[in-house]
Amino acid sequence: MKDDALFCVGQKAFIEKDGKVLVLNDPMEGLDFPGGKIQEGEAKNGDASSLTHSLQREVLEETGLKIEVFRPFSVWYYEFPKNHRNYPRVVYLVGFKCKYVSGELKLSDEHNDFRWVDKDSYKKVDDGSVFFDVLEKYFE
């Protein structure tokens, strides 16, 4: 991201496997989902397939999982906290419904824990964040 950028755009994967969705824990920020900022050059001429590949790449890097990406279901924004390297920028995020395809879950150093949640158990991860609000929307 360029130093003078006020905001960036990112994607988050809501990966479903056996009726449950993968949630991650970011040790600095709490509840999170695999994904990340769209890198310069990844959104070629507005080609949606290049964005799909970008999200698949991020998920593979962060979790070791291969996924199939379906449709977006939510758009929200997140303000980086003061202790974050991207402060004071804002990231606009697009949440995609995804399906687990293959791989063994292995977290990168960006996250320190994970959990698979379903409609009956997702409220246990409520940390009051906008990420939980989007998870709640997913299960509506």
Image (cartoon, rainbow, N blue to C red):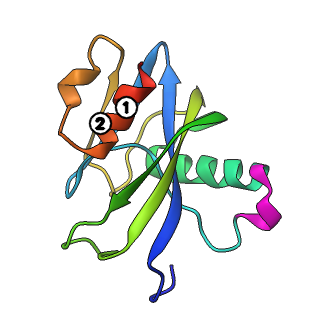
In the image, 31: left or right of 20? left
| Residue range corresponding to the magenta coloring | 43-48
Q: Are marks 2 and 1 in contact (CB under 8 Å)?
A: yes
Q: Within 10 Å of the Cα at label 2, are there few (<14), some (14-19), or many (20+) other Cα atoms?
A: some
Residue 102 in sight in this render: no
Task: Kindly indicate the quadrant of the structure image that contains residue 118.
Answer: top left
Whether residue 87 is situated above or below residue 12 in the rendered picture: below
Amino acid of disc 1: Leu
Q: CA distance from mark 2 to mark 1?
A: 5 Å
x, y percent for residue 16: 50, 24
Residue matched to label 1: 135
Query: What residue sits right under mark 2 in the picture?
Result: 132
Q: How many marks?
A: 2
Vertical relation: 69 (above or below) 17? below
* Element type at mark 1: helix
* The image quarter in which residue 114 lies: top left
Front-most of residues 15 and 61: 15
Q: Secondary structure at mark 2?
A: helix
Q: Residue at x 44, y 78 (%)?
A: 6
Q: Residue at x 72, y 64 (%)?
A: 43
Q: Residue 9: horizontal and vertical position, in percent?
A: 53, 62
Question: Of the residues shown, which amino acid type is indicated by label 2?
Answer: Phe
Left or right of 66 on screen, residue 20 = left
Does the stretch in magenta take in 98?
Answer: no
